[in-house]
């Protein structure tokens, strides 16, 4: 299982060749949020469907001021050929142009830098394969999710996570179970009642509980100003009222990799 980046680490900067030309990673991100997808070698069935879904969701990522980039241990030429398959899978004309670049990492230098080689999965040459990772980058904030090779990721959930990260980077709120965009948010229990009234002018609604404690407080979803702001997006907006993160390991019976790693933000109960 790779070590690599941890929650709160700054993404390393690097230069690389991609299907859209040579980039400097930090310049590519600019002041946008970013999602980096780390697929296996080209032309794998599961990841063809994943990148196809990412292509279809490109307008949704753009609405959220999110730049998407993929990285794979193959050449630019291989990636351009794979792009045609991805477009064809989506029922589109098989062209080489995707709405996001794919990084050429045929030397695996970036895979090593990011700690994304997985000794538990081997290719036909018995060499470690790259772990299937999603990194979501925001100002001083990162979320990484690790999947087994045979498990297709849920891009609707990735969009939901982006919505959450952008909200909590700016507002002192948390999300209840099964929260969706537009649902009410939970006011952090660390915020005093009078301050909450000022922070949330749409109203704070408290659930009466047998304990008498007033920690279950909801408010309509606040407006986010980070989206579509381009270079007006602040670089450092870590919300100091946010509680600590729990690192959750789920064991999944799998012939290959048996761990899914996710960062789950914990709402204090009282």
Image (spheres, rainbow, N blue to C red):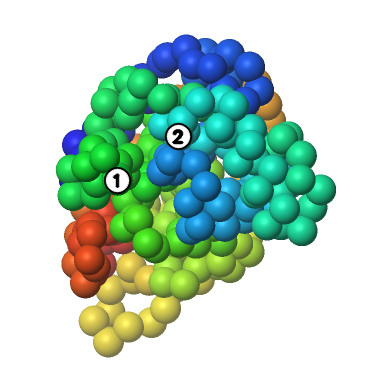
Numbered disc 2: secondary structure = strand
Q: In which quarter of the image is the C terminus?
A: bottom left
Numbered disc 1: secondary structure = loop
Residue appearing at x 41%, y 43% in the figure: 40
Question: What percent of the width, then of the height, locates residue 244?
Answer: 25, 48
Evaluate whether residue 171 shows in this view. no
The answer to which of marks 2 and 1 sits earlier in the sequence is: 2
User: Rounded to the nearest whole Å, what is the CA distance between mark 2 and mark 1?
Assistant: 17 Å
Evaluate whether residue 104 shows in this view. yes
Write down the quadrant of residue 194 in the picture.
bottom left
Write down the quadrant of residue 133 in the picture.
top left
Residue 81, compared with residue 248, is above or below; it is above
Question: What percent of the width, then of the height, locates residue 55?
Answer: 67, 47
Looking at the image, which is closer to me, 142 or 197? 142
**How crowded is the residue under tag 1: few (<14 C-alpha within 10 Å), some, or many (20+)?**
few
Q: How many marks?
A: 2
Residue under pointer 1: 124
Q: In which quarter of the image is the N terminus?
A: top left
Residue appearing at x 73%, y 34% in the figure: 97
Looking at the image, which is closer to me, 123 or 208? 123
Residue 137, compared with residue 224, is above or below; it is above
Write down the quadrant of residue 30 in the picture.
top right
Residue appearing at x 28%, y 73% in the figure: 213
Residue under pointer 2: 72
Q: Nearer the viewer, mark 2 or mark 1?
A: 1
Residue 47, compared with residue 15, is above or below; it is below
Question: What percent of the width, then of the height, locates residue 116?
Answer: 29, 36
Looking at the image, which is closer to me, 265 or 219? 265
């Amino acid at each position: 299982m790779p070590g690599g980046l941890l929650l709160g680490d700054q993404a390393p900067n690097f230069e690389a060749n991609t299907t859209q030309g040579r980039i400097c990673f930090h310049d590519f991100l600019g002041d946008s949020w970013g999602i980096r997808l780390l697929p296996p070698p080209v032309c794998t069935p599961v990841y063809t469907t994943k990148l196809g879904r990412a292509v279809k969701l490109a307008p949704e990522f753009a609405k959220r001021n999110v730049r998407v980039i993929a990285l794979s241990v193959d050449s630019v030429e291989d990636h351009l050929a794979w792009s045609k398959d991805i477009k064809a899978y989506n029922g589109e004309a098989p062209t080489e142009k995707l709405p996001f670049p794919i990084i050429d990492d045929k030397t695996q230098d970036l895979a090593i830098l990011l700690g994304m080689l997985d000794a538990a999965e081997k290719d036909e040459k018995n060499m470690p394969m790259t772990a299937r990772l999603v990194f979501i980058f925001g100002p001083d904030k990162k979320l990484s999710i690790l999947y087994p090779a045979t498990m297709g990721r849920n891009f609707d959930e990735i969009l939901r996570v982006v919505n959450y990260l952008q909200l909590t980077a700016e507002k002192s709120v948390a999300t209840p179970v099964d929260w969706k965009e537009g649902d009410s948010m939970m006011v952090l229990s660390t915020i005093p009642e009078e301050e909450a009234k000022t922070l949330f002018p749409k109203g704070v609604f408290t659930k009466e509980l047998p304990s008498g404690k007033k920690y279950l407080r909801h408010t309509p979803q606040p407006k986010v100003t980070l989206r579509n702001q381009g270079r007006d997006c602040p670089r450092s907006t870590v919300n100091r009222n946010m509680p600590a993160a729990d690192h959750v390991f789920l064991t999944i019976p799998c012939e290959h990799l048996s761990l899914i790693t996710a960062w789950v933000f914990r709402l204090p109960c009282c």
